[in-house]
């Protein structure tokens, strides 16, 4: 079975541009969460989606947005890119939300470099 | 919000040695996850702990959650070069935030052959 897949794996963008990152969850999983991991730090929560609805949002500016599609795949969009947005963006997949200690599985991430 | 502190920040051991990584929370842990990460790659799920006093093992890795559910430890027995990487603990905030994980800063493990 395929795990969580993210695309692209690497991306270089210029300041001020827009970027779209994509994630396909594990088959049967209905929840997707997005995390940003800056070099040398742990991942920081950005968004959680379940059944196409936003269930949680971290402390990120409105330049960050996301959506989930009927097939449970998800996109993370970042507008007006800043140098500080350079990071590894991770997608996590879980079967459900609202239940304690649901296992979350991560993709390989998208390495975004803003120049 | 919940904060997780990992110690040590980095660890260098000789192959065959045992080691322990600690994760301390500022609040009661509703769920504690351990992940391993190779540099620049995704997170590999290791174990999840739920109950106070719980202990789980997989191959040479054992994770424990204390009775008060504010501290967890990850112990590796007879370390191997394949154990090298970044170990991250993540906490489920619980309540309406179930599924939102807060992570520690990570522990970098180097194992010399």
Image (tube, rainbow, N blue to C red):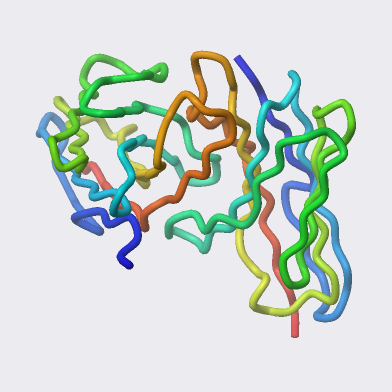
Q: Is residue A7 left or right of residue A55?
A: left
Quadrant position of the N terminus of chain A in the picture: bottom left
Which of B35/B39 is in front? Answer: B35
| B31 vs B75: above or below | above
Give coordinates of residue B79: x percent, y percent.
Answer: 79, 74
| A60 vs B76: above or below | above
Give coordinates of residue A70: x percent, y percent.
Answer: 13, 36
Q: Residue at x 66, y 24 (%)?
A: B3
Q: Quadrant of residue A81?
A: top left
Q: Quadrant of residue B50?
A: top right
Q: Is residue B83 left or right of residue A113?
A: right
Q: How many marks?
A: 0
Q: Residue at x 30, y 16 (%)?
A: A61
Which of A8/B35 is in front? Answer: B35
Q: Residue at x 21, y 24 (%)?
A: A65
Which of A77/A53 is in front? Answer: A53
Q: Quadrant of residue B60?
A: bottom right
Q: Residue furthest left?
A: A17
Give coordinates of residue A7: x percent, y percent.
Answer: 20, 54
Give coordinates of residue B70: x percent, y percent.
Answer: 80, 28
Q: Residue at x 15, y 26 (%)?
A: A79
Quadrant position of the C terminus of chain A in the picture: top left
């Amino acid at each position: 079975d395929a795990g969580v897949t993210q695309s692209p794996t690497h991306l270089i963008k210029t300041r001020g541009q827009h970027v779209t990152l994509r994630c396909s969850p594990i088959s049967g999983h209905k929840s997707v969460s997005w995390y940003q991991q800056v070099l040398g730090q742990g991942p920081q929560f950005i968004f959680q989606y379940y059944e196409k609805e936003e269930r949680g949002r971290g402390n990120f500016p409105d330049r960050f947005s996301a959506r989930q599609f009927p097939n449970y795949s998800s996109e993370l969009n970042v507008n007006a890119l800043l140098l500080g947005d350079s990071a590894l963006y991770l997608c996590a997949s879980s079967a459900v939300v609202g239940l304690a200690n649901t296992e979350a599985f991560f993709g390989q991430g998208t390495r975004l470099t803003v120049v | 919000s919940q904060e997780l502190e990992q110690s040590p920040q980095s660890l260098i051991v000789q192959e065959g040695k045992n080691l322990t990584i600690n994760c301390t929370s500022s609040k009661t842990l509703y769920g504690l996850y351990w992940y391993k990460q190779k540099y620049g790659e995704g997170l590999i799920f290791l174990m999840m702990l739920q109950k106070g006093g719980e202990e789980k093992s997989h191959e040479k890795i054992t994770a424990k959650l204390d009775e008060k559910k504010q501290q967890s430890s990850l112990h590796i027995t007879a370390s191997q070069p394949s154990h090298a990487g970044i170990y991250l603990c993540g906490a489920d905030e619980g309540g309406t935030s179930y599924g939102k994980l807060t992570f520690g800063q990570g522990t970098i493990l180097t194992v010399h052959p």
